Amino acid sequence: MLKFTDVWKSYGDTKAVAGITLEIRRGEIFGLLGPNGAGKSTAVHLAVGALIPDRGTVAIGEHGDPSLPDVRARIGIAPQAISLYESLTAEENLTFFGRLYRLHGVQLREKIDAALRFVALIDRRRDQVKTYSGGMKRRLNLAAAVLHEPELILLDEPSVGVDPQSRNLIFENILHLREQGRTVVYTTHYMEEAQRLCDRVGIMDFGKLLAVGSVSELLTQQGGKTALVVTTDGTEIRMETDDPLGELNRLAAVAPVADFRLERSTLEQVFLNLTGRKLRD
């Protein structure tokens, strides 16, 4: 559905995207993770044709270059910076965006109704956006992205600054989009979101794609061994092992085991292993 082939993009001397080659499959939720400045937002802007690669190609399915208007019309995007007109109502915002996608009349009204129901804002359709909470604005941002029923939807940090209820609804919406056969690219800083939602994950840093795979594949390849933590004779013993049950039995044979637990690798550990622990501002 989305293909990057040796894509490069620089701002002056800064290589924001440095030779990315990636294929995102039709109907999957693909998580794009990375520290601040890793190149995620630049990759999203390249994917929707808002930026042109310095080198390499970006293609949307069999349609081709996303900078072409007819191809771009097949894409929906909810950018990290909320892109709404606060003095307009929800309905007026969606009317404006719908007309940009050449929707009119009964068809436009039906799609506005469907999009507002999708994000649970149908009862607030005639309220000005400036009266909305942060979570409601994020949901309306999502409604604008899916209004025209695009094949590919790019969501750039869609849960930033929202309350738990709105975040949960956004997650349910994203899973529902996959059920409809849509392809979703999801950028986030939150590892638990990627583990919950994504079929596959790509981890970026300094413009490069460091690893791609399912969460379980990344945990196996990059996360390190499972750690067995055993309390015996008042002492806590921690060991990394490929055979935690065998190690537990060996320890239990020589001393009584008061308690034990397994510490498995997490996506956050994989992320830190690949990108380091240095602060990014």
Image (spheres, rainbow, N blue to C red):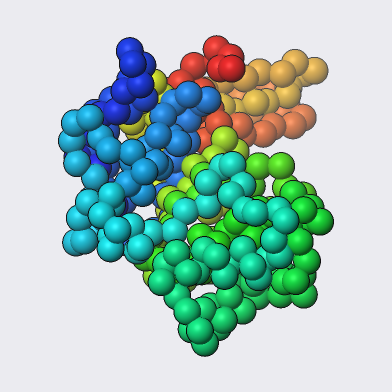
Percent across and percent down for residue 80 are 56, 42
Q: Specify whether 212 is left or right of 215.
A: left
Percent across and percent down for residue 223 are 46, 29
Percent across and percent down for residue 229 are 65, 26
For residue 85, which quarter of the picture? Answer: bottom right
**Residue extending furthest toward the bottom:** 106
230 vs 57, nearest the viewer: 57
258 vs 14, nearest the viewer: 14
For residue 141, which quarter of the picture? Answer: bottom right
Q: Tell me: residue 153, above or below residue 214.
A: below
111 vs 184, nearest the viewer: 111
**What residue is drawn where x is 57% and y is 35%?**
189
**What residue is drawn where x is 28% and y is 49%?**
67
Percent across and percent down for residue 118 are 62, 72
Q: Tell me: residue 194, above or below residue 96.
A: above
Q: Tell me: residue 180, above or below residue 273.
A: below
Q: Specify whether 81 is left or right of 26.
A: right
- Quarter of the picture holding the C terminus: top right
**What residue is drawn where x is 45% and y is 45%?**
31
- Quarter of the picture holding the N terminus: bottom left
Query: How many labels, in total?
Result: 0
Q: Specify whether 29 is left or right of 22.
A: right
271 vs 108, nearest the viewer: 108
Q: Is residue 271 visible?
A: yes
Q: Is residue 119 visible?
A: no
Q: Specify whether 181 is left or right of 146.
A: left
**What residue is drawn where x is 36% and y is 43%?**
50
